Amino acid sequence: MKFETRAIHVGQLPDPTTGAVIVPVYQTSTFAQEGLGVHKGYEYSRTGNPTRSALEQVLASLEEGKFGLAFASGLAATAAVLTLFQAGDHIVVGDDLYGGSYRLFEKVFKKFGIEPTFVDFDDIHAFKDAIRPNTKLVWIETPTNPLLKLIDIKALAKITKKAGVLLAVDNTFASPYLQKPLLLGADIVVHSTTKYIAGHSDLIGGAVVLNDKAIFDQLKFYQNATGAIPGPWDVWLTIRGLRTLSVRMREHDANARYLAKFLDKHPAVKKVYYPGLPSHPQHALAKKQMAGFGGMISIELKGGLKAVERFVKVLKIFRLGESLGGVESLMTYPAKMSHGSVPREERLARGITDDFLRISVGIEDKEDLRADLAAALVAAGKF
Ligand SMILES: *Cc1c(COP(=O)(O)O)cnc(C)c1O
């Protein structure tokens, strides 16, 4: 079956007791047992819940993996992967990544003795050079947040396989509709399902998908042992969202292509970051590795913070806020939001200037979105 069909049917057979076409919300903590040790496969909802099982199956299918595990958030899923390691282990991390993941590696797991080395994302050889005898994992995002850089997953997987190191890819920005890291040689895929997978900005969730049974067993044990599971209702909303992932992604992608071209030509815009533009340094890789370019665009305005302030004041459809991947368009100002805790010098060195904005392009009408940006850019351009 194709992706679109699997999104709607895998793990979602009619309910065996009632025939309900939609997976029910099994809002229950426990399950009645017929006798001592006799049950229908579910005992307690931390360990397993039928609604969660449905989500885990469909997510595994969409990522072309054997096993899926749902967590309470993207960061809970990331933390689960890190518990595969122990004090004295080393991990290599691409240096352009979600701020919360950076904080988790640097401020939480480091103190338990899992040492991260952050390497220059633009140089694939830097990953190879950073691998030591005690390295257990290479962690990347592609496209990255917020600079929308790409890395060749297949080429990196060759390096990690040769070194006997696991490769984990945070696939949140692309979604499985546009990119399938496991098929390119990655060992583990992580998602913040909060974003495109659930797609409606109404919940927080995460997931891990993989093929290796032994690693899955360890993660499943961890999921039950530490308990960072999503509740049945959030899981149900995630399933409801991901059934339309393909149609949403096509619209996000089409709208973003249209707006990126418009922004690229606009005199008030200094620079546009979008993998779909031929000027993007990894445009050729994006065409090869992804089935589209996605809905995320970053821009730099001309005129610094003042221009940004004028710009955001005029926006009517784009909501100013954190997050991404919902049906509604969002405008994020990383300097004061996602990267607010990064010292200014370091932020500038990473290319996140004072007039840098990240856009999550929604699936509203593209002309309405263009008109909204156009009006705000007139305001931004008044020096
Ligand atoms: C949002 C996000 C996360 C964290 O996910 P939460 O669901 O907020 O915990 C991780 N990685 C990326 C790329 C994200 O955008």
Image: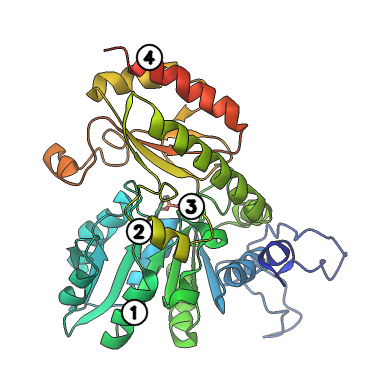
Percent coordinates x, y for residue 324 in the rendering = 47, 43
Percent coordinates x, y for residue 381 in the rendering = 32, 17
- Residue beneath label 2, please? 150
Residue shown at 33% from the left, 54% from the top: 149
Q: Which is nearer the eye, 44 or 276?
A: 276
Q: Quadrant of the N terminus?
A: bottom right
As shown in the figure, which amino acid type bears the numbered disc 4?
Ala
Question: Is mark 2 in CB contact (under 8 Å) with mark 1?
Answer: no
Marks 4 and 3 sit apart, C-alpha to C-alpha, by 29 Å
- In the rendered view, tell whether residue 361 sits above or below residue 241: above
> Mark 4 or mark 3: which comes first in sequence?
3
Residue 6 vs residue 305: left or right? right
- Residue beneath label 1, please? 166
As shown in the figure, which amino acid type bears the numbered disc 3?
Phe
Marks 1 and 4 sit apart, C-alpha to C-alpha, by 48 Å
Question: Is mark 1 in CB contact (under 8 Å) with mark 4?
Answer: no
